[in-house]
Amino acid sequence: MTNIVERKRPIGSVIGSILSYIVFITWTLITIIPLGWMFYSSFKSNEELTRDIYALPHDLFNNYDDEYVVVAPSLNIVPDYDTKTDTRERLIIESTTISPTRRLMMHFRVKEDLPSEIAGRQPGDIVVVNELPDKMQKTIHRKTIWFNYRSAIQRAGLGGKFINSIIYAGVSTFLIVIFGCMIAFAISKMQFKMLSRIVVGIIGLGYLLSINSVIIPLFLLLSSVGLTDTHLGIILVYVAFGMPLSVLLSTQFMRGLPSSLVESAYIDGATAFRTFWSIIIPMTVPVIITISIISALGIWNEFLLVLVLSSSDFTKSLPVGVYSFTSLTSQQLGWQLAALVIATIPVMVVYFSFNKQITKGVVAGAVKG
């Protein structure tokens, strides 16, 4: 009979594993809990957030018993319908619980669709949601739940800023990848050793600079050439600051590729440009994906550059739109949180969809060569 002796793990190894799990779980909670709080708090009214910032949302969901006060038409009330094409008389009501007297939670109900007793109420009278017809109750209920998101999109023009962020991230990332790979190809596979060292040194120096440290010279430079408050000016700056990472990662990766492939292409009569597009680019897909994701996420979340260089809504990006809800006189926390959720969801989708490719590309770019 064979005796099986079980080896006991050293006590130091067990303690190390426990500490590793504790750190990992703690870090995960530190990351996830704020995201969860931001999401559920985006469905809370400004008054709720002021009363208890950690409580679960209530006012925007339990709204069938909400009271609305009838108000008279005035210049500071903006209808949600076209007054020129739709001339039907409406009963204007404003919430007494959500942003009362601020003309933010307003509903314009067609009087002919209302019971005569409710349609005849005068300014100052109270209307309870559950007194209205079922269809109107459901409409008000839905609009109340999504109040923060509707306000964030409509009042801050987040739709246009969202498109601007896509333009900045998409165009800048494309140029960063293409130019970075071209420079990396020249450095790693062409016979310009001394020049390559100088270029790598200059690019490495550029990697040490940040937008924050040179924002004033950048503003003065772009002002002198008329590129402030333009998409082109902002994209050029993003490309310039994204190039060092792209070049360094691509160079390390390409140095690990067999030079015989390039030499064979030249023997077969391929030009340097054809060799780059047909051989190098397909083989550097892992690092290209990594550079694209890192650059796009960084540009998507960037705030200071657009804040300084953009003076009109036409060129402002999503992070600046989120900041616009804060002022010296008031702060719309609910709208700001809803805007943050809108800005965060694309980032999370991209990251969770490509996190394996990011890891593979970083490892490949660091190990090869």
Image: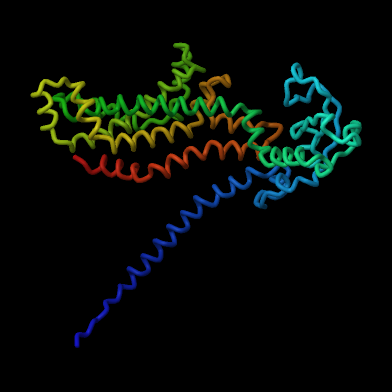
Camera-side residue: 265 or 32? 265
In the image, is 131 to the left or to the right of 251?
right
Residue 198 % position (x, y): 22, 25
**Residue sitting farthest toward the left:** 267
Residue 5 % position (x, y): 24, 81
Within the image, what quadrant is residue 262 found in? top left
In the image, is 19 to the left or to the right of 113?
left
Q: Does 84 appear above or below 90? A: above
Of the 4 image quadrants, the one containing the C terminus is top left
Q: Residue at x 80, y 47 (%)?
A: 65
For the image shown, how many numbered marks are present on the structure? 0
Q: Residue at x 80, y 20 (%)?
A: 87
Camera-side residue: 77 or 136? 136
In the image, is 315 to the left or to the right of 191?
right
Residue 93 % position (x, y): 82, 33
Q: Residue at x 65, y 51 (%)?
A: 54
Camera-side residue: 216 or 239? 239
Of the 4 image quadrants, the one containing the N terminus is bottom left
Within the image, what quadrant is residue 143 found in? top right
In the image, is 146 to the left or to the right of 93?
left
